[in-house]
Image (tube, helix red, strand yellow):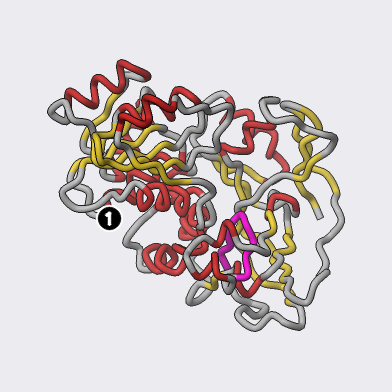
């Protein structure tokens, strides 16, 4: 099969890889209908995360089950399925508590490389969720979004305790941040402030439910949020970037007693202990337990109540994966969808 491989910073190649095979009786093989480039893929692409030799890429995926191991009972060949970036058994104590991304048996899908034509999914019974039927082609981008960025934005909103009568701030205007806006709206937030400097992303944030746009960053961004919230700050803030500046901006934008949901993959983030101590701010986040939310998200997409697939503003064949990375790196695209 064909699949994307990162050889070095800014060196993505699509080449022949071995077809996936059933290794464990709990595996499934799926033929991918769509995959994509994630903002977190840009960390190694830019050389911020070390690339130690050729690395298969991709962890977001939807497709049709081709084959299952002897112990798989929840999905069958021919079903269209959505999975998440960590395989999980969905039965251990941590999974049952809703933290499948910390499953005691978890396996990273990125190790299999989902930017490809086919994929082996470990722990298929706990990881994959089938749609009611084969979806219409126009729904596939939205189901692909559910595999990571929608589920991650949703977790950010839940972790920040977004809800009715609350003001929510979203720090970050990538796909996760934009879908956190959508999630906050679905959870009933009264006011949603999106922090963005890029007009196409601002427009999409408004489509997803943002009521205010703040273009300032850092201390200026915090001051603007305080100005919009009577000097108090927001009840709920979603951090969807993963840098020192974005985390401090999120904490600073939160009122005492408020909640920060952080879902940006943290890189060299250090929290000032004394400042945090006196802020009275709750912090909760980490790798999103997307599997927790998949049944609800699949239903919302299937019934066309939400359209998260709008975050894909560039669609390319898998063979042009390198251009998809380049476009996102240069902020010419919010998110690239790849068609195998």
Residue occupying the point 68% across, 39% down: 321
On the question of residue 175 being in view, the answer is: yes
Residue occupying the point 55% across, 34% down: 266
Q: Is residue 66 left or right of residue 312?
A: right
Percent from the top left, x then y, of residue 289?
Answer: 51, 57
Residue occupying the point 52% across, 63% down: 291
The picture quadrant where one finds residue 104 is bottom right
Depicted 127 relative to depicted 203: above or below: below
Percent from the top left, x then y, of residue 175?
Answer: 46, 41
Residue occupying the point 27% across, 55% down: 187
Q: Is residue 236 left or right of residue 179?
A: left
Mark 1 Cα shell of 10 Å, populated few (<14), some (14-19), many (≥20)? some
On the question of residue 80 being in view, the answer is: no
Percent from the top left, x then y, of residue 305?
Answer: 32, 61
Residue situated in front as seen by the camera: 37 or 41: 41
Q: Quadrant of the N terminus?
A: bottom right
Residue situated in front as seen by the camera: 225 or 1: 225
Depicted 111 relative to depicted 106: above or below: above
Identify the residue under disc 1: 187
Disc 1 is placed on an element classified as loop
Which residues lie in the magenta part? Answer: 81-89
């Amino acid at each position: 099969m064909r699949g994307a491989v990162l050889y070095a910073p800014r060196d993505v190649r699509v080449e022949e890889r071995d077809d996936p095979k059933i290794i464990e009786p709990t595996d499934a093989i799926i033929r991918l209908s769509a995959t994509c480039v994630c903002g977190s893929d840009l960390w190694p692409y830019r050389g911020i995360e070390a690339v130690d030799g050729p690395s298969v890429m991709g962890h977001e995926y939807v497709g049709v089950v081709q084959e299952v191991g002897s112990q798989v009972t929840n999905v069958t060949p021919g079903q269209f399925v959505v999975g998440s970036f960590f395989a999980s058994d969905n039965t251990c104590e941590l999974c049952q508590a809703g933290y499948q991304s910390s499953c005691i048996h978890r396996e990273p899908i990125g190790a299999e490389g989902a930017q490809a034509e086919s994929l082996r999914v470990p722990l298929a019974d706990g990881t994959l969720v089938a749609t009611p039927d084969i979806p219409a082609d126009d729904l596939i981008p939205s189901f692909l979004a559910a595999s990571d960025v929608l589920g991650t934005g949703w977790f950010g909103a839940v972790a920040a305790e977004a809800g009715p009568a609350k003001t929510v701030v979203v720090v970050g205007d990538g796909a996760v941040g934009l879908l956190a806006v959508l999630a906050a709206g679905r959870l009933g937030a009264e006011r949603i402030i999106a922090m963005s400097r890029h007009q196409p992303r601002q427009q999409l944030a408004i489509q997803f439910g943002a009521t205010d746009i703040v273009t300032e960053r850092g201390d200026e961004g915090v001051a603007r949020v305080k100005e919009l919230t009577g000097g108090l700050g927001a009840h709920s803030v979603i951090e969807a970037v993963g840098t020192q500046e974005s985390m401090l901006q999120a904490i600073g934008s939160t009122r005492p007693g408020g909640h920060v949901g952080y879902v940006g993959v943290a890189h060299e983030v250090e929290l000032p202990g004394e400042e945090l101590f006196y802020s009275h701010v709750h912090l909760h986040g980490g790798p999103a337990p997307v599997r927790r939310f998949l049944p609800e998200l699949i239903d919302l997409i299937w019934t066309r109540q939400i359209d998260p697939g709008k975050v894909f503003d560039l669609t390319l064949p898998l063979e042009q994966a390198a251009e998809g990375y380049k476009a996102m790196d240069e902020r010419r695209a919010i998110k690239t969808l790849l068609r195998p």
